[in-house]
Image: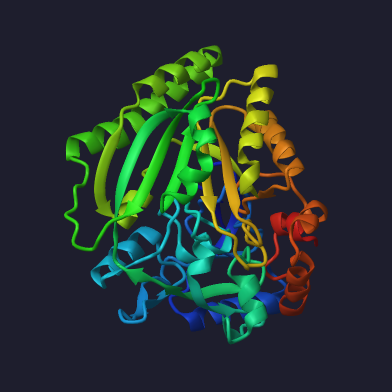
Amino acid sequence: MTTWTNWAGNVSAEVTVARPTSVGDTAKLVSAATARGERVKPVGAGHSFTAIAATDGVQLDLDRLAGVVKADRETGLVTVLAGTRLHNLNETLWQFGLSMANLGDIDVQTVAGAISTGTHGTGARLGGLATQVAALELVLADGAQVRCSADENPELFAAARVGLGALGVITSVTLQCEPAFSLAASEAPARLDDVLTDLDELIVGNDHFEFYWFPHTRRVLTKRNNRVLPDTEPRPLGRVRHWVDDELLANSVFERLNRLTTRRPGIIPRTNAIAARLLSPRDYIDRSYRVFASVRRVRFREMEYAVPRAAVPTLLAEIEKYLERSDEHIGFPVEVRFAAADDVWLSTAYGRDTGYVAVHQYHRRDHTAYFAAVEALATDLGGRPHWGKLHDRDARSLREAYEHFDDFVALRERLDPQRTFANDYLDRVLGA
């Protein structure tokens, strides 16, 4: 037995670790565990804040089941093994002349873990990572190996693209990629009121738009990323600017500032105001995956809610009212992103254009009251919680939020009646 802990340090479990090196190994391990009545959970990078990857049985570490199986530059179809880390995949894709259409702002996850929890980026015309999946291969609880796509086992495909690890172990993912592209990034401070006034125009007028609101202020940092023509000369950030902005200020100084404000939370409104005023614009052009992803070394807890896009200003206003009437002092910016509607059963963007509002708290500070308040506000607006980020919703309340919730549960019952892939988290959000 060994102790497993997630990245954020808020979830741990005593597990027996198995490290399959092939799909066949994976099938044997799963079928043997099912025969013994043991539970099995695959684990990727452990970057989920929830206990979705925790188990009291066998933990499948898929790090050895990694790499690109095949890539077709003409069609853009790339098959990759489940344990491949996104940052490694992106580098490899670039060598093939390909890119993923959209990415989240962190790239340390495995491809299977990112898809299974509903990871997304931002972009009004683009869905989450699951919408880039053309096919999946899974190992079921009895060890059977199955493939699904829009044409082959379509019901399983609709469910397994955001499958929460509840249906089987994903062993490979076929992605629909695009010709490699670069992005022109434009980052600038702004006033929250101005951004909200022009929000629809900002969302639809950029390939990718997001902003970060500094609580206790009316200031934000906006990020606009737009594709450039293939022959555009790259203009990446200089080494010094990159180090100062992304390593020193965003990580080292931010860590020290959070340690200080943990001891003296009353100064947070003032430090937020100072930090927001110190922001300076920057513009650069680089490979798409280098623009999408950022390095995050400061540990935190996170909750993110998906609400109808039009409800974003209301939710932010309600969060601000809560902070004004409470004793909460929040040093982490609130992150706001956007995505197109999709048809994946348990996707947080299922059936509606979506705005994502993510709240964070430094790992040394208590997050519970803040997150509970935001969750209540978001739920009242029809919000759906990110499956890999903290929330307190259960199967009863989530059933109302998803048209195909009962379809997913019924499919799970057929594929895993013994609950080989169950754990306490899935028992709560899907029912035991």
Which residue occupies 55% across, 58% down?
340
Question: Quick check: 65 left or right of 347?
Answer: left
Hey, which residue is sitting farthest right in the picture? 396
What is the x, y in percent for residue 249? 33, 29
Q: Is residue 238 visible to us here? A: yes
Q: Position of residue 278 (x, y in %)?
A: 34, 21
**428 vs 201: above or below:** below
Q: Residue at x 47, y 70 (%)?
A: 82
Nearer to me, 234 or 260: 234
- Asked if residue 178 is positioned above or below residue 365 in the image, the reply reads below
- Tell me residue 290's x, y (percent): 31, 52
The residue located at (47%, 35%) in the rendering is: 212
Quadrant housing residue 265: top right
- Residue sitting nearer the eye, 63 or 238: 238
Identify the residue at horizontal 70%, vertical 41% (top origin). Answer: 378
In the shown orientation, is residue 423 left or right of residue 292? right
Q: Quadrant of the C terminus?
A: bottom right
Residue 86 located left or right of residue 240: right
Residue 56 against residue 417 in the figure, above or below: above
Of residue 226 and residue 118, the one placed in the foreground of this image is 226
| Residue 327 in view (yes/no) | no
Colour option used: rainbow
Q: Quadrant of residue 256?
A: top left
Q: How many marks?
A: 0
What x and y, as percent, mark residue 373? 71, 32
Q: Quadrant of the N terminus?
A: bottom right
- Quick one: 10 or 98, which is closer to the camera? 98
